[in-house]
Amino acid sequence: MDIETFDPEKFDPTAPDFNADPYSYYAAFRRKAPVAEVRKTYTGQWVFSRELVEVVCAKENASVFLKPGKNRAHDSLRPFSLGAEFGDGLFFMDPTRHGEVREIMEGVFHTAINGVAAKAEEVAQRLLNEAAQAGQLDLITGYAGPLASEVFFDIMGIAMGSESVVVDQWIRDALRSHDKMLRQDLRAQGGTTTMALRTYLLALGREAARAASANKTSSGARTMMAGIQDAVASNGLTQDEATNTAVNMALGGYLSTEFLIGSGVYNLLRDPSQWQALRDGEVAIDRAIDEMLRFDAPFQMADRYVEKDTPLGKFTLKGGQVFTVVYGSANRDLPAGEEPARFNIRRDNRKRKNFGFGDGIHYCIGAPLAWTVTATAIQTLQKACPYARIGQVGHWGSDPYFRTLSNLQLLLR
């Protein structure tokens, strides 16, 4: 894509070439229209520059740049839009309630993920042992997805087997329905499964609380769902807040980890020297993951809302409408001399913000989980399959909000 001839007015976020490489488009927008009106399918103002994304996400601006939660602009049709009548979960709350619920959930989450690294390694080893016989592995469907989901279901207290298969499909259908390129019947299916997921998690929480109370289970062994219901019992959360927070955690809880493992390994193996540097211990895994998040984040953008016309730099955001901050663009907004379009795990990203997990008061609460599982997944894969290489590569998802490959074949021998 030629930056010089790029016309922001003709930008189409549903075009296949944008899905394959959104970053050249982001660069063109930063140069020509750092805040732009997107007119096709994903309508609204998009914010591309690092400077302006930082302003939107700053903690001191959290009461100006709001979340598009309850009773704000919704683009889904009835009956599904009626879900807005439920109280918001954590991911869509604003101050001051957001801070109160976030503090509660931090404690619940910290307890639930205790020992997650050992669980992730156990699952990773089992999956790789199964793949070793075949000599190849689909990284997404055969490793990243099953690993991330099993770890997350263990944390939530969801039984593996037929139950987890159904819930996994509900979660994937619900997230997939965000893609406006889907046929209307498929988007409707996602709305239906979201309703089913809400009902399921409400019942699961009550069951978990009863079981924990009956068995006098110690807090260290409690699942996340039991912890959330404890907060309801103590009047820390309303039932709507508890259930929708659980839905939020389910939709973002492991799919972001799956997406990060997929794109991270893909980018490592595209440059075997970087795969080798990480494998041989020349670069720490934390630095490598930091670069994975900067270069190819699993969540590329997030929506915000302003109640009235609001200045942002030299621009004005339209009041009463949702607008979009493009994290994937802000992460690539570096000085040219730093080669922002180059994947380099030796890069020191500590001197500037990384928006791979968002920023400000809405920084992803699940980041420690995603980070730990991703680190374990990649290190276990490198130890078991040190000479893995890329085979067949699938397509990138069509929803611009998410960055994920459909499949990625690894040749292990």
Image (cartoon, grey):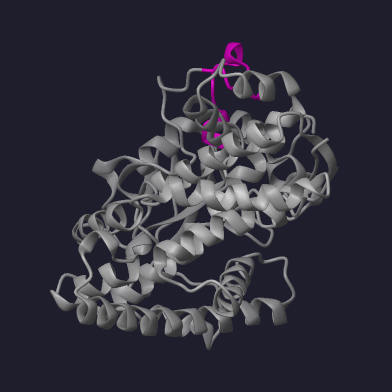
Identify whether 83 is placed above or below 282: below
Q: Where is residue 60 in the image (x, y as percent from the top left)?
A: 24, 42
Q: Which residue is situated farthest in the top direction here? A: 337
Q: Residue at the location (34% across, 58% down)? A: 308
Residue 141 located left or right of residue 336: right
The number of discs equals 0
**Residue 87: image location, x then y, percent:** 31, 76
Image side of residue 290 versus residue 204, left or right: right
The residue that appears at 33% across and 65% down in the rendered structure is 224
Q: Which image quadrant for residue 357?
A: top left
**At x 78% / y 52%, what residue is drawn?**
15
Residue at the extreme bottom: 79
Name the quadrant of the C terminus: top right
Residue lying farthest to the left in this orientation: 234
Query: Quick check: is 335 in the magenta stretch?
Result: yes
Give the extent of the magenta segment. 329-347
Q: Does the magenta stretch include residue 40?
A: no
Residue 239's quadrant in the figure?
bottom left
> The N terminus lies in which quarter of the figure?
top right
| Residue 164 in sight | yes
Residue 54 in the image: state x and y as whole percent.
Answer: 39, 36
Against 40, residue 269 (above or below) is: above
Residue 66 vs residue 248, the one in the foreground: 248
Q: Most prominent secondary structure in the magenta stretch?
A: loop
Q: Is residue 174 above or below residue 29?
A: below
Question: Horizontal placement of 276 versus 149: left or right?
Answer: right
- The percent position of residue 173, horizontal first and vertical second, equals 63, 72
Can residue 98 be seen in this snapshot?
no
Query: Nearest the camera: 392 or 191?
Result: 392
